[in-house]
Image (cartoon, rainbow, N blue to C red):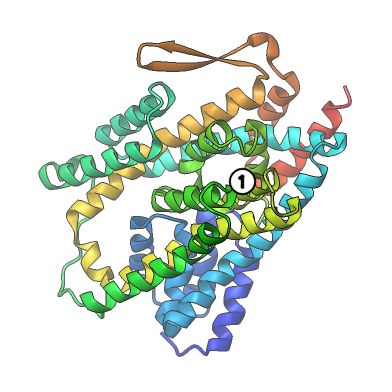
Amino acid sequence: MRSVSFGELVRVSARIGFLSFGGPAGQIALMHRELVDERQWVDEGSFLRALNLCHLLPGPEAQQLATWIGWRLHGTLGGLVAGMLFVIPGALVMLGLSILYALAAKISIVAAIFLGVKAAVLAIVVQAVLRVAGRALKGPFQRVLAVLSFVALALLDAPFPLVILIAGVTGAIVARRRPNWLKLHAVPDGAVTTIASPARTAGTVLGWLVLWWAPMLLVFVTLGPDHVLWDIGLFFSKLAIVTFGGAYAVLAYMAQQAVETMGWLRPEEMADGLGLAETTPGPLIMVTQFVGFLGAWRAPAPFSPLVAGLLGAGLTTWVTFAPCFLWIFAFAPWMARLERMTGLQGALAAITAAVVGVIANLSLWFALHVLFARLDTVRLGPVQLLVPDPASLDWRAAVIALAAALLLFKWRQGMVRVLGICAVLGLCLSQL
């Protein structure tokens, strides 16, 4: 590993931040090419071990990996710079798109474009289910976990955090008693070394908890716990703790709460937000900023809608990503020990399997709300079903979703191109 100046770290981190399209797989591949293959700032083994650590932590793994690399090269300041530069370009683009959406979403041309975007999102989420399933479901036990998590969410209306908690506890137990069920990797041999101490870790955690919750304290003191900004900050702070498995894993839970419980936006707007997030650099979880912006925009008092939206977007972004710095700065020094914790590895493997069912539930939720204008809720004991009215089918959305599926699965087109083609299709079919 060669010596890297702080200025070099800033320049390359900014470059990665502006080019980090394509979801976590593409973002991690970009960092590997730029930092391991071309510049040799970190070696292959360290990069992979850090990536394993990031998979253990809640939040976007690519952003956490960027933070770890900055920390490895220039300590806490380097981690802050690399992590923030990974997020800031996408956050600024998403903020601009959110403002335009709030101002122009009701214009017929814009609505027609988003008809195509929403339909394309259906195929994109199905692709995510298949991609994660191929990586996570290595045996019968994982497949059973995936099915059970889907049933719990889609039919029993179980809370997403509870599903993740049960999967994690189950995985930790199984890892100790039947490790072959989870197909865990062998723990590397060798002496365990660490560069951290419990006292220093406790100080890091305490300091970041204060920073994480400082904006929330300001909202509580100035606006009170009944204001929408308090609700936004509290909700996304809780979401940041359970964001295992990427943004797709929590989208259904976030949509359910933001749409049905909080009333911040409509189901089709949730799909619009995901479509926008797919076109911006940075983590897909940036869709939370879109939700926070609209939630505050629609309940702005005592501010103007724009000011409230900006505050909502800023607060959402902070409480979503501040914990990522906490996890890395607290746990990166303990990386060698964490890799050897069998229970923790088992919990992660089980959560990853359960996430397949979670994303499958998300695809069902999006399909029902995008393709049908009217849905009825039918309860049969503990089972809750969303039943669409066949007469309310939007044939235009169905046609565009089919076209998106062909573009993605048959012709292997990139995500941004698929979204663009489907937006044009939405514009054309809306004229019929």
Where 28 sits versus 396, above or below?
below
Quadrant of the image occupied by residue 306: bottom right
Q: Is residue 182 left or right of residue 124?
A: left
Residue appearing at x 74%, y 50% in the figure: 305
Q: Is residue 29 left or right of residue 393?
A: left
Quarter that holds the N terminus: bottom left
Quadrant of the image occupied by residue 112: top right
> Is residue 278 shown to the viewer in this render?
no
Where 262 sits versus 192, above or below?
above
> Is residue 308 shown to the viewer in this render?
yes
In the image, farthest residue toward the right: 431
Q: Give the percent coordinates (x, y) of residue 341.
A: 19, 59
Q: Give the percent coordinates (x, y) of residue 178.
A: 13, 41
Quadrant of the image occupied by residue 270: top right
Q: Residues within 10 Å of mark 1 (few under 14, many from 20)?
A: many
Q: Give the percent coordinates (x, y) of residue 8.
A: 57, 85
In the image, farthest residue toward the left: 177
Quarter that holds the C terminus: top right
Q: Nearer the viewer, residue 246 or 20?
A: 246
The amino acid sitting under disc 1 is: Val
Where 399 sits versus 18, above or below?
above
Q: Is residue 158 left or right of residue 100?
A: left
Residue named by callout 1:
291
Residue appearing at x 57%, y 59% in the figure: 315
